[in-house]
Amino acid sequence: MVRSVPQLDIDPYSLEALADPYPNYRRVRDTGPVVYLPKYGVYALGRFDEVRDALANWRSFSSAQGVAMNDVMNAAIAGGTLGSDDPHHAALRAIVGRPLSPARLAQLRKVIFDRAEVLVENLVVQGRFDAATELAQHLPLTVVSELVGLPEDGRSRMLVWAAANFNSLGPRGVPLTEEALPIIREMVDYAYSCTRDRIKPGSWVAELYEASDRGEIASNQVAALMNDYVGPSLDTTIFAISNLIFLFAQYPEQWARLRSNPAKIPNAINESIRLESPAQSLSRMTVRDVRIGDYPIPKGSRFSLMFASANRDERKWTDPDIFDIDRRTTDHLGFGHGIHTCLGANLARLEIAAIVSALVKRVERIELVGAERRLNNVLRGFGRLEVKVH
């Protein structure tokens, strides 16, 4: 007998759900290994094993059919690193990933850590600051401004474009999606205006032009691939930093533990990204019939892979809603999994580690003054996070 996939009448893209997604995630996990969301005509995976397996199985759960929840953006990203499968994806990833190799990042480490030291020292002297804007935005914006190499005239819009980049991946009819689509057009126009003569020599985008000279990519692909540096390198890292500061304000004993043993910083970063995943979900489409648990799913089905739900799955983690910097979390899904694991994950870790390393030397306690989430269809983070440091 063929079993019908259980349905849930929830809207994970409502403003209320975006502000607090975790009750919906729990309902998805509790209902079954796969559920159907009739409001959007998609299947959802919320448990750790099922999300990880789908991310690993690109031959069945394809990115080449788009990772957005709407056809407009899926058509726009088709053929790029985000909207492709191997071997095409691997070839593009190798080119875009050159500046993000371990050897290249090692060359940046001292610069990034030195800048974090100056930034944090000045903010600690203030005593009170907005960790979302004054702290978390500084290093990611510096990377885009100085390393990516884009012209000055668009930099004031970078954060607006980065937010729209992820909001545009939501379903049509959702206000955040509809507001984002015209902004994406503006971002695309800017990218195509970034001709070779306007790019900083020796920058990451200059390397893309050099790759086109060698015939590795077509010249008209350069503008599209710029987005792999601009969009993901901003808000995801900015939100990861502010989420971590928020968690340490909520868990002062964890901050004290980290100060007594700064070697735990890498694991604290992983635990923060597990618990408050900056990227909450992305989509895939099945290109063959699949079976999830006892449920057969036909080819051509759209899926929402809920990373943030998987990262709080009780089947995987003990006390998953608790922040514990001693937890073993190297296999969390906050950076994805499989061939589409976040290309900039190591850069993000480097920037976050630089900030935290500077803070643990100077700050005994982080006190939360006020906070406001910045709602996004895909991302979770803060628009405002006022703190006092002692």
Image (cartoon, rainbow, N blue to C red):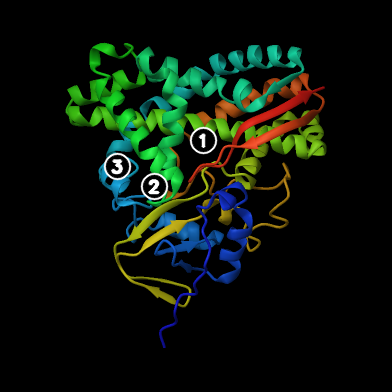
What residue do we see at 56% from left, 20% from top? 138
State which quarter of the image contains the N terminus. Answer: bottom left
Q: In this view, does 239 lie to the left or right of 377?
A: right
Q: Is residue 221 left or right of residue 59?
A: left
Nearer-the-camera pick, 143 or 186: 186
In which quarter of the view is residue 357 placed?
A: top right
Disc 3: which residue: 77
Quote the CA–CA distance across marks 1 and 2: 19 Å
Quote the CA–CA distance across marks 2 and 3: 17 Å
Q: What element carries label 2?
A: helix
- Asked if one can make out residue 86 in the rendered structure from this viewpoint, the answer is no
Disc 1: which residue: 236
Position of residue 371 measured from the top left corner of the image (x, y, whole percent): 69, 34
Task: Report the amino acid beneath label 1.
Answer: Thr
Q: Is residue 288 left or right of residue 374?
A: left
Task: Report the amino acid beneath label 2.
Answer: Ile
Nearer-the-camera pick, 318 or 185: 185
Question: In the image, is residue 129 above or below residue 283?
Answer: above
Position of residue 59 measured from the top left corner of the image (x, y, whole percent): 32, 58
The disc, 2 or 3, on the residue closer to the chain's N-terminal end is 3
Task: Report the amino acid beneath label 3.
Answer: Ile
Q: What element carries label 1?
A: helix
Question: In the image, is residue 121 above or below residue 130?
Answer: above
